[in-house]
Image (tube, rainbow, N blue to C red):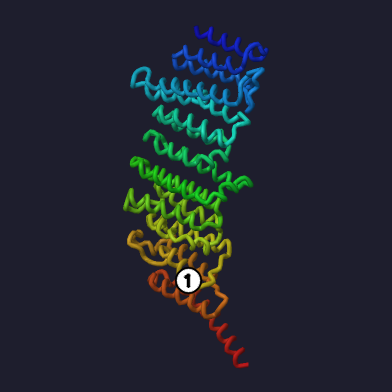
Amino acid sequence: MICTKYLLITIGIIYIKLGEASAKEMLKDMVEMCRGVQHPLRGLFLRSYLLQCTKNLLPNSTISNEKEDNGTLQDSVEFILSNFAEMNKLWVRMQHQGQSRDREQREKERREIQVLVGTNLVRLAQLETIDVDMYKKYILPKILEQVVCCRDAIAQEYLMECLIDVFPDEFHVRCLNIFLKTCADMNQMVNIRNVLVTLIERLSSLGVTEEGKIIQEDANLFDVLSDEIASIVQSRVDMPTESVVALQVSMMDFALKCYQKRYDYADKVLQVTCSLLQCKSQQKFAYNSPVGKELIKLLRLPVDFYNNAMQLLLLKNYPLVLSLLDHRGRIKCSCQVVYNMLEQRTFVKTAEQAEMLLNLLQTLLKDEPDQPKDYEITEEFAEEQILISRLIHLFSADSSDVQYDILMSCKSYFTAGGAHRYRYTLVPVVFSAFDLVRKYSDIQDQVMN
């Protein structure tokens, strides 16, 4: 019986190519004929064969020709969506056949043939005359309806990622609200992190191109994306903490690439991260734990992107996220900031900047409750203090009075760090003070003359 179906499809294709039958009617007949095969695996391959054979025969015109009646773009869309809906049902049905002990094997088999279902979405994306309005009003709702109704974690995750991959970037930007609301309705077993990270990365890659202006021109896009993701995370109480932070890492990358001048967007990512993590845990995260590694990634992104610690100081929530790490993690991130300043020769020009920077780097400047015992006698400690002493030479104001205020701030922070620290850090401050005395002397000589 199944062989007969394949032959009928082949005959139907020949009829369309020879012009012996209307493509519109023949496509309808063939997709309905496939309903007779309800065995999941056989049905999937039969419908995949149908989709493959009709690849170059689908009507793509937006104008109907009454004489030939070969169909329009709408007929092609309906044909593919109908085939997609049936294939998805067959694919999901495979999960519920056989013994429960064979569940893992069935899941493996399903993943091996998932591309058969996804090809329907590829065919839709290849229809050149589809525009954003048709996609938003008709195609996307039909696809998302099937995704939500199947309630199958494997199908939902794969189909959402497939949607992101095959359709143009502009479509995703214009339909972001609809897509994100569907993510909130998906099965709790879906690895929503993979879906959302794929979407954000796609938008980020668009933001650095000329076409990315559609993202920058939409002032509400970032807020919508950020708020919806935060809502999705809060609704999934079992979501791993490292997945929560990984999402915010992607959001930070998106904010930095697409909204370079909007420091408030990058700061909002840090604020949301802090809020979400405080709800999940009150403890510090170890630097080498999955969560700690993601937090370090998050904190390093703006350091490497701005290459200017003075711009980093505009992110008010940066110290709050930094405080979520354990002592070693805070040391690691603080050293990254100092290394970047030394490499980029970033000078501190005002007392306010000096105060903010020293406060940010306070883990390097004073004893902390969670630091290891006898930490001050380790080689790592000495290296960190030498690093801070090198940093002092970048504290250079244009005004002598401002330079004096900067050095007094340094003295205040360094003396509070104890003798085991200021034997390293006060030396460059003293030498900077000598230079300042010379400047004051030169100023006095100029006044006297």
- Other residues around mark 1 within 10 Å, as few (<14) / some (14–19) / many (≥20): some
Q: Whole-percent x and y of residue 177?
A: 47, 41
Q: Is residue 173 visible?
A: yes
Residue type, label 1: Glu
Q: Residue at x 33, y 50 (%)?
A: 279
Residue nearest the viewer, comparing 98 with 65: 65
Q: Residue furthest front?
A: 66
Quadrant location of the C terminus in the rendered image: bottom right
| Count of marks overlaid on the render | 1
Q: Is 240 placed above or below 327 here?
A: above
Q: Residue at x 59, y 20 (%)?
A: 52
Q: Whole-percent x and y of residue 181?
A: 43, 39
Q: Quadrant location of residue 50?
A: top right
Q: Is 2 placed above or below 132 here?
A: above
Q: Whole-percent x and y of residue 51?
A: 56, 20
Residue nearest the viewer, comparing 220 with 250: 220
Q: Is 376 placed above or below 441 here?
A: above
Q: Residue furthest bottom?
A: 448
Q: Quadrant location of residue 346?
A: bottom right
Q: Residue at x 39, y 53 (%)?
A: 274
Secondary element at image label 1: helix
Q: Is 251 placed above or below 419 here?
A: above
Residue nearest the viewer, comparing 369 with 267: 267
Q: Is residue 290 visible?
A: no
Residue hosting label 1: 352
Q: Whole-percent x and y of residue 373?
A: 33, 60
